[in-house]
Image: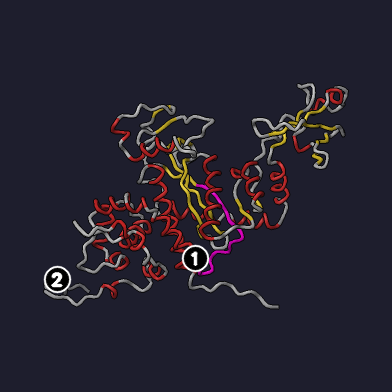
Amino acid sequence: MLGEQVGQQDRLFYEFDIEDRVPHDHLLRRLDAVLDLSWLRAELLPFYSHTGRPSVDPELMIRMLLVGYCYSIRSERRLCQEVELNLAYRWFCRLGLEDSVPDHSSFSVNRHGRVRDRDVLRKVFESIVRRCMDAGLVGGEGFAVDASVIEADASRFARVEGSEVDWTQAQRSSRPVREYLAALEAENAPTNPEREPKAMSPTDPTAAWTTRGRNKVMFGYSLNYLIDMENAVVLDVEATPTRISKEVDATETMLERTQQRFGLKPDHIAGDVAYGTGEMLGWLVKRSIDPHIPVWDKAKRDDGTFSRQDFAYDKDRDLYVCPAGKTLKTTGKLHSDKTYRYLASKFDCDPCPLKHKCCPKTPSRKVPRTLHEEARDHARSLMETEAYDRSRVRRKKIERLFGEAKRNLALTRLRLRGLTGAQDEFLMTATVQNLKRLAKLAAIPPPQPIIA
């Protein structure tokens, strides 16, 4: 049945409560119930000014950012417009109908200045992790690590071949270029020292030229996650240029920071073969963390000759025994590639009937053994256990987090440039994911142990 519209919006006064206009099952209500940012004002107290324009409330700024990343609104200008119009956003940001929303320019200045200088976004992220721990969502026994490539805000068509760029004064004044030039002089440079980059972006030089992203070639950053496999809570996040060596280094950083900040040290950690380098496995075993990680092994031969695993290592005598029963000994010298070399005697190899399957093109056989070979052997032995099989299955939870970030939170291309810009976006994404998980699972009591 059709009829004339009743409301004409001609009333002078309205009785209105914003609380009644936000549904009780709204996502922002559930997030607000587990969010506490009362400590923020004290954190940024030195930046408050008693003169000039009123300061932007830091809690308002963080709440607006959470709204933006929760609903894929990463433009400051559009975010301010949406908070101005949306009642649920206003309610979550503690704004009344007559309260003004910060201007987008003031919002951006504070976000990229004071908030970044005090590392506020990481502190917000860590406060949510502690809330997850208090709610019993973190087991602390098994972690998983992985990285996913996110496209940088840099055109792949506007690139400089190689790593040498004749920076103009205007380019040097931009924040991403300043950060890159400063990082080159630091200990942890964004590039690999042994290999120069194939291409570089003049607008975001820290981003790595990669073929691992959604495009055939592009500039990208790696979103590195360290999660607890119990409920897929993100314990730490790190932004790196998309280079495997940097992703492996980030794992050490995240594990050390998680132990320092939260007192969490896992019994085992799961990862894919990219983390199965000898150096990484040795670092984990040295800290009594079982690596549920496939070993990165390039020693296997495909030409029909014996591989290194065909030689048995005798630890007591520190030598290898070949398939024919002869010994290969070492001088004990550690070479530049961090390997010891075990050599067979030419007098043993010459008359050997297996020489054509062992060393047909050399006078005698040589077997390299890395400095971390014991850790690699330990990782190989773990691959036969039930615990490894469970970790291999549970590790897939981290892939779902990456899928959620890209599909639901629209983190397919960065909006901010530079390593600090990528770090800000990754921290906010992980914070929103943990908040959603906390809001969903906090009301569910942890399982009680069965008493026989």
Quadrant of residue 364 in the image?
Answer: top right
Which image quadrant: the N terminus? bottom left
Residue 172 position, x and y percent, is 32, 34
How far, Cα to Cα, is label 2 from label 1? 46 Å
Identify the residue position indicated by label 2 in the image.
9
Assess whether mark 1 and mark 2 are in contact (beta carbons under 8 angstroms): no
Tell me if mark 1 has few (under 14), some (14-19) or many (20+) residues whose alpha carbon lies within 10 angstroms of its own.
many
Q: Where are the magenta residues, as a range? A: 134-147
Q: Measured along the vertical axis of the image, is residue 298 above or below residue 223?
A: above
Left-right relation of 60 to 254 = left
Q: Which residue is mark 1?
A: 132
Residue nearest the observer in this picture, 274 or 8: 274
Residue 217 visible, this angle: no
**Residue at point 54%, 30% (across, down):** 194
Q: Is residue 145 magenta?
A: yes
Residue 439: tell me if it is visible. Answer: yes
Question: Quick check: 309 left or right of 350?
Answer: left
Asked if residue 396 is among those painted magenta in the image, a careful observer would answer no
Under mark 2, the amino acid is Gln
> Does residue 418 lie above or below 407 as drawn?
above
Q: Secondary structure at mark 2?
A: loop
Mark with earlier residue (2, 1) = 2
User: Residue 243: x percent and y percent?
Assistant: 51, 39
Q: Report the residue at 67% width, 39% height from top.
A: 297
